[in-house]
Image (tube, grey):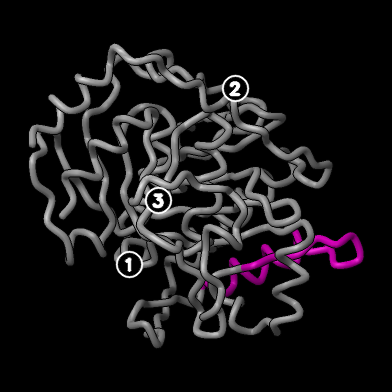
Amino acid sequence: MNFDVVVKSFTIKTKVNYLKDAVLPTNSIWDAQFVYSTACKLANIAVAEQQKLTTEIKPDNSIVTQADKLVEDTAIAALANPDNDTYVIGEETIKELSQAQLDQALAGSCYIIDPIDGTVPYASLTPLWGISIGFADKGELAEGCIILPGTFEAIITHQGKVLYGKGVGELPKFEQLVELSPELKNNCDHPSRVLVINQLIAKTKQVEGLTRGVTTYYSIVFPYVYLAQGRMAGICAGLNIWDAAAGSAILRNLGFYQSFIDGTPLSFNITQDYDFSKFKQGQARSRQMMIASKDQQFSQALVTCIK
């Protein structure tokens, strides 16, 4: 099946405005300027620690560095406030929680942290890594911030909008961030035709019938940031909650279509969309592979190409 033919066959249909139809939760906890300042400080710590790396192999055979732990501990110290019913779920510390503590976090206001998304490129001194902070209010994913220190880029939700900036030699100041448009043509002159699949799909699935470019990253933060701008065309990946939380919330605020590979739309209720039964093993994976793009029909066509 030719992917482009499938997509073009849907162009005469009425487009759905997912941003207009979405009902985003409102909350007073997410302070975008404070979160952004915190994320930039975490990025500075990670960059400094990159010069004195030590690594370990986790039970799932992925690697972790001393920076992952330091960045996450610093984020928890800055963001968690149990007295205000505000908690942090992090990739490196979730297995230390009791079931009662996890339930409390999922029911309250909860930051969801990936201290270094893309630990392999980070440890290899390549720039394809980032800091990811998502936020859920009463279990519903609502806000996100991603920092890309290697390319001096940042993206964050703020009052129902999404702000983006790219610095020169340093991360941009919060006031330098500009609003991204839900219309991709307003963000870049030539929206991308590149589709992103994660490592698991690349290693276990076949992709057939595509006339578009396909790439895979060892992190998901770059595809999320670039999809939001139109520099990527779509993402298909199975992810842990800390991998997806920030990026998925950012795309939600921009009105992107997000679903499971069987076509079921994401609910953005994190206990419905992710399986926490193995949190003691450091896993909280999406219940299926997930698809994200600007258009539902585009996503459906992409699914037909993954065997």
Seen at 46% across and 40% down, the residue is 152
Residue lying at the far bottom in this picture: please name it: 59
Instruction: Give the number of the disc on residue 20.
Output: 2
Q: How many marks?
A: 3
| Disc 3 residue type (three-letter) | Phe
Seen at 19% across and 44% down, the residue is 304
Instruction: Give the number of the disc on residue 232.
Output: none
> In the displayed structure, would residue 162 be above or below residue 204?
above
The residue where tag 1 is placed is 120
Left or right: 1 with respect to 153? left
Magenta stretch, main secondary structure, is: helix
Q: Position of residue 70 (x, y in %)?
A: 59, 72
SS category of the residue bearing label 2:
helix
Seen at 17% across and 28% down, the residue is 6
Sort mark 2 into few (<14), some (14-19) or many (20+) by Cα contacts within 10 Å. few
Seen at 54% across and 63% down, the residue is 115
Q: Position of residue 142 (x, y in %)?
A: 65, 44
CA distance for labels 3 and 1: 27 Å
Q: Position of residue 33 (x, y in %)?
A: 72, 38
SS category of the residue bearing label 3:
strand
Sort mark 3 into few (<14), some (14-19) or many (20+) by Cα contacts within 10 Å. many
Instruction: Give the number of the disc on residue 260.
Output: 3
Q: Which residues are magenta?
A: 67-89
| Disc 1 residue type (three-letter) | Val
The answer to if 83 sits in the magenta stretch is yes
The answer to if 200 sits in the magenta stretch is no
Comes first in the chain, label 3 or label 1: 1
Comes first in the chain, label 2 or label 1: 2
Sort mark 1 into few (<14), some (14-19) or many (20+) by Cα contacts within 10 Å. some
Left or right: 76 with respect to 2? right
SS category of the residue bearing label 1:
helix
| Viewer-proximal residue among 277 and 246 | 277
